[in-house]
Amino acid sequence: MPSERLLPRLFLILLLAVLALAGWQWRHGAPLSADLMELVPGSTPNALELKAEQRMQEPLNREMLVLVGQADRQKAIALAQRLGERWQASGLFETVQWSLQTDLPALREQLLASRLAMLARADRQQLIEHPAAFIQQRVQALFDPFAGISLVPSQDDWLGLTGRIQDSRPKPGAVQFDIGSGALIAEADGKSWVLLRARTRGNAFDMKLPVQVAELLKHSREEAGQDDAQLLAASGLLYAASGQQQATREITWVGGGATFGILLLLLLAFRRWRVLLAFVPVLVGMLFGTVACVALFGHLHVMTLVLGASLIGVAVDYPLHYLSKSWSLKPWHSWPALRITLPGLSLSLATSCIGYLALAWTPFPALTQIAVFSAAGLLGAYLTAVCLLPALLKGSDLRPAQWPLRVCEVLLRVREALLRKVGNRLLLTLLALFCAGGLWQLTSKNDIRQWVAAPPQLQAEAQAVARITGYQPTSQFFLVQAADQQQLLERQTALGERLDQLVSQGKLQGYQSLDQVVSLPREQQQLQDSLKQLPGFWQPLLDLGVPASALQSELAQLQALPIQDIDSALKGPLSEPWRLLWLGPQADGVAGMVSLRGLNNADLLRAQAEGLPGVRLVDRLGELNRVFAATQVSAAELKLASCVLIVLLLILPFGFGGALRIVALPLLAALCSLASLGWLGQPLTLFSLFGLLLVTAISVDYAILMREQVGGAAVSLLGTLLAALTTWLSFGLLAISSTPAVSNFGLAVSLGLAFSFLLAPWAARRADNTTTPGQPSREDHPVTTAGQDDPQPIPLKTVDPARSPCAND
């Protein structure tokens, strides 16, 4: 026929165009992304909140904290220095800091210039209200051998303001400054731990950098082991490297395992090497899905690839539609087999795409991309199976193994015997009790941390670093807005008073805010004015031998210091930890942040902002978890809407009753899967729900196959079994993924596929359901076709109009 020559040619032209587009998309390298934040849902934050979140996430994505531990303090310092120099020379890092020695001149300069701006509130009040007590404490500090070491010599700061500033700074946990080497050292577990901080040139979502950093760290560990030292590291880069390596492994064994299993299944069933061409639609489908995602989103996420690899099992179902008819068509030829299965195959594509695209309307960018990938991939697989594969299989004489058909015949006889003894009503009652018991035990769990498979070693090291250094940052922070800098500092001061209470109660480890690094302008002015009274109180310093001229000179310097604002206070190295908290001028004023350490109780934190204008808690993790729970409801509603569309689509070929039955069976399979999760003690997560939504789309195909029964009930059941097995080989492998979200998704789909296959025979017409076991129906007799060279194949079977695949119930 002309179409048999024209369709392959037209499709090859389309395929070449898609390949050219793919080549253009990949011209600068693989357009892949590993940024999980691109996949998370939630309300779109305003520009200021988005900027604040990015600022707070930057240290987690670019910085790495490393502790070099050794029993000998000097050896630990020497090893940290050696590693720091090597890391800096690697070209991977923007800065590598193991010592503050090089910053000492700049630190002294900032301390001297900020003596008024950075003096703590308590010290400032004492100097203004009780100058005599202030001077007396300074005299005692000069004589106290256990007083802390000041970075500024006494002759440059006789009043000791810089020393008080040093002592009042929020301490970074248990880490202490070593004046001899300039290193930051903590003592724990019988070892001296030298802190090494590295900042990379790229971030954790770079596709190459995290793996390179992890490899460098591995070599450094080996070197440290030779010196009887230990390295502990904590960084988002290491989790990203682990995630990328894991994604690569899972793409390999999910895609590779599914491919091997499906190819083996095809060979065992059809016993012809040429049947492996049925995998061509899978390859084309992956190509179409990739090109569509890059075209719409600009890139393809690695998680889409992991879940998209499971498309293999669904895409291969299309050629199986007509390959499975080789058990009834004698002889079997590709184009005639395609023509009699094309209506069901087309309906399968339509229903599957409706099911997949329903996910695209959820507020989940991850599901939107997966839905687009899957729908485009299925379309590519369908076009290949319809337009190209029959030409590739032309002339093939399939003689499939008979044992799979006999197995399906036995299964149908067992089902009929069970129905005669038990009956549909009792089976439905038992199924209802099973579902009720499982749903009663089912719990719900929604947590974004399910997206990440955190290796125990990385978690243990991060916990060890937090324990030794005392540094435990949280994902929550306060965003403070105000009309000007004065009001911003006032609001942060008011918030700080509340947070100080949590710190004193042991509920909060600490916090950082801009008012810790610069005081209010009016307070600086008040302090500067109060300095005039000091000459009347500094007699104890004169008695100690401090020259009066030195004190007068220092007083003149203090009175000449300019009033600092936030921008000037943040310029020096001492202010580096606070620099990211300043968001600067905004359209309606200024904004800054308050970071937190050691508390994850969002409700307690949210209460601290009550009654403070311009102050709000930003809890992205909590917001996402709340959206996860809300999305479950919207996803279920979308699925019901898609089911209505599928029913409307199926009314024409199958009638209203038939369409309802075809759609009801996948929904019942999903309900049974939910109950199974409850019986297994597995929680219902957003990803397991999405898996079940996909099952309802995929298993409509099985119901259509059993409804049409082209070639007979046993042949249709065999086609359903092959389709379910190939799909399970893809999705089932996801169940053993080490990523909780992916594993939960795979488990839900596996359960859904099993129930879909078991329930699919009930999609048949009532007349077919009551066929006597062991007796063929009117459609079960062998079918003959014309030879491949006959331009007009003879009818495949005698069709009773009352039992036509398109007849209504």
Image (cartoon, grey):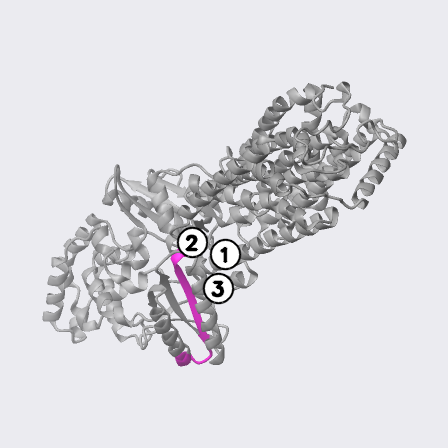
For marks 1 and 2 on the same chain, the one whose residue lies earlier in the sequence = 2
Is residue 667 at all visible to an observer of this figure? no
Q: Bin the neighbour count of mark 2 within 10 Å (Cα to Cα): few under 14, some 14-19, many 20 and up.
A: many
Residue indicated by mark 1: 244
- Residue 467: mark: 3
Residue 62 sits inside the magenta stretch: yes
Q: Report the side of 659 relative to 549 (left or right).
A: right
- Residue 616: mark: none
Which residue occupies the foreground of this view, 680 or 220?
Answer: 220
For marks 3 and 1 on the same chain, the one whose residue lies earlier in the sequence = 1
For marks 3 and 2 on the same chain, the one whose residue lies earlier in the sequence = 2
Q: What residue do we see at 56% from left, 57% from top?
A: 249
649, above or below 529, in the image: above
Q: Amino acid at mark 3?
A: Arg
Element marked by disc 3: helix
Q: How far apart are the alpha carbons under marks 3 and 1?
A: 28 Å
- Estimate the x, y position of residue 708 in percent, counting from the top left: 72, 28
Is residue 515 at all visible to an observer of this figure? yes
Q: Report the side of 698 relative to 405 (left or right).
A: left
Residue indicated by mark 2: 205
Q: Which residues are magenta?
A: 60-75
Which residue occupies the foreground of this view, 42 or 113?
Answer: 42
Are the two marked residues, 3 and 1, in contact with CB atoms closer than 8 angstroms?
Answer: no
